[in-house]
Image (tube, rainbow, N blue to C red):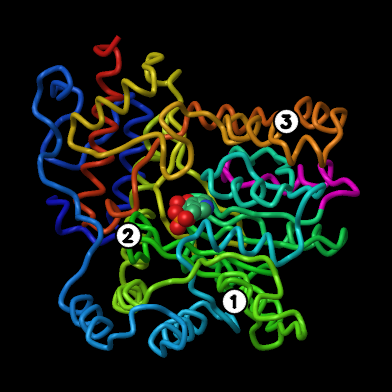
Amino acid sequence: MNKNNLTRRQFIAAASAGSLAAAASRTIPAYGDITNKASKLAILGGRPVRTKRFPRWPVWDKTEEKSILAALNSGRWGRVGVKMVSAVEKRFAELMGSKYCLLVHCGTHALHTSVHVLGIGGGDEVLVTPYTFVATIDAILLEDALPVFVDIDPETFQMDPDKIEEKITENTKAIMPVHITGGLCNMDKINSIARKYNLKVIEDACQAVLAEWRNKKAGTLGDLGCISFQSSKPLTCGEGGAILGDDEEIMDRCYSFHNFGRPKGKFMIRDRGDYPILATKYRVTSFQAAVLDAQTNRLERQFERRAENADYLTSRLNEIPGINPRKDYEGTTKPTYYAYAFRYKKEHFNNLPRKRFLSALRAEGIPCSSGLGTIGSTSTPMNKEGLIEDALNSKSFQKIYSKGRLNKYREQNHCPESDRLCKEVAGFGQSLLLGTKRDMDDIADAISKIYENRDKLA
Ligand SMILES: Cc1ncc(COP(=O)(O)O)c(C=O)c1O
């Protein structure tokens, strides 16, 4: 039967049937024109599974052009007093189910502002995952607080909620769950621990726009939620970020902090001049808001497409020994995909190193990497990155923290599950999931082709 005539359900049934056949013969079914075992790997000079490009990112059309021109022609290019920026904030808050939204220049600024306004500073500890992007950690260290690393759950790749309590001390002030790759942390457990110990929850939802935990959007599940609109994100305006929250005074503090400390709304300090607090400037431009507004129009359609393709791809990748896609907790009503991540278990691939596996996959025409918006090219887990020691040795840390405390911190800074994940993780960016089912088959066929020919890559 021609695969293009199959419904999605038939596809998955076909994939499952293929699974049984595969188990019997140790041959993984291919859905494209190739027979995986017989065809030569592209990295060894064979024909690649795919030569066609995957969908480009970002996606734009005349809507963005019109929106940017409207901002340009308004002559109001900043943010203060610009109605268009406030209108986009209102629209995004409504979409996310949050009372308030503040646009800022980027996700990093959203995180830094949140840590600052919640009063976290020198001597405090914030619980966080080591499997994240550096900005999460920067936001804590920039306020002279200590990021205390909680190891990850090996199946979901998220902060392991069952390892949080053992890390709480009298100095712990907040938990910072990071919904990594677009999957959600276990927010039932995290919020319940936060309530028990009176901790703040700052969600780093930079990679998880529109994902839902029990029908509530990521970024609206804690005290403050941070979103990124940086170029690779599913909702983008090049650079941009947002803070979501329901508490008016805290949100006014956020506004004030991102606007040189000028008083705002409920956050009013009188008799201390025009700049009553030390702050910074993290304001967005009207051009960023204009692009964001236009991009929001197609956000939900793209979200559905990614989810459907990811679902199908997972059903195919589950067929291949040694390829273990990231899982979601049961409370995740809608996962999203900033990246499609899986563990690559080299022992199933004749001990083929991950780097070589990824090169072989790229040669087959599948853009892929081990980075996925988290670790860099050296695959160093964030708790072992140089910035930690740099901060601990800085003048301010040396003055705030005793030598004994810093040494104890160093001794306890171990997260073996995250170390293992950083060595095994692989995948690709969200834009590949905007393609067709046939594109998903190409990805799965390329991986199974490498699996079938693993002994030829020694
Ligand atoms: C998990 C995470 N946190 C924070 C950030 C920072 O966002 P931005 O790049 O918009 O500053 C990013 C984005 O790159 C991210 O992936």
Helix, strand or loop at disc 3?
Answer: loop
Q: Residues within 10 Å of mark 3 (few under 14, many from 20)?
A: some
Tell me what residue is drawn at x 35 percent, y 68 percent.
304
Look at discs 1 and 3 and give the one toward the viewer: 1
- The answer to whether 369 appears left or right of 416 in the picture is left
Q: Residues within 10 Å of mark 1 (few under 14, many from 20)?
A: many
Above or below, 426 relative to 268? above
Look at discs 1 and 2 and give the one toward the viewer: 1
- The answer to whether 22 appears left or right of 446 in the picture is right
The earlier-in-sequence mark between 2 and 3 is: 2
In the image, residue 160 lies in the stretch drawn in magenta = yes
Q: Which residue is mark 1?
A: 255
In the image, residue 37 lies in the stretch drawn in magenta = no
The residue closer to the viewer here, 254 or 444, is 254
Amino acid type, mark 2: Arg
Do the residues under discs 1 and 3 have CB atoms within 8 angstroms?
no
Q: Which residue is mark 2?
A: 9
Tell me what residue is drawn at x 55 percent, y 71 percent.
217
Above or below, 87 relative to 400? below
Q: Which mark is residue 413?
A: 3
Amino acid type, mark 1: Tyr
Helix, strand or loop at disc 1?
Answer: helix
Helix, strand or loop at disc 2?
Answer: helix
Q: Give the distance between the C-alpha atoms of the residues marked 1 and 2, in whole angstroms.
A: 48 Å
Q: Which mark is residue 409?
A: none
The residue closer to the viewer here, 114 or 8, is 114
Highlighted range, magenta: 155-172
- The answer to whether 51 appears left or right of 423 in the picture is left
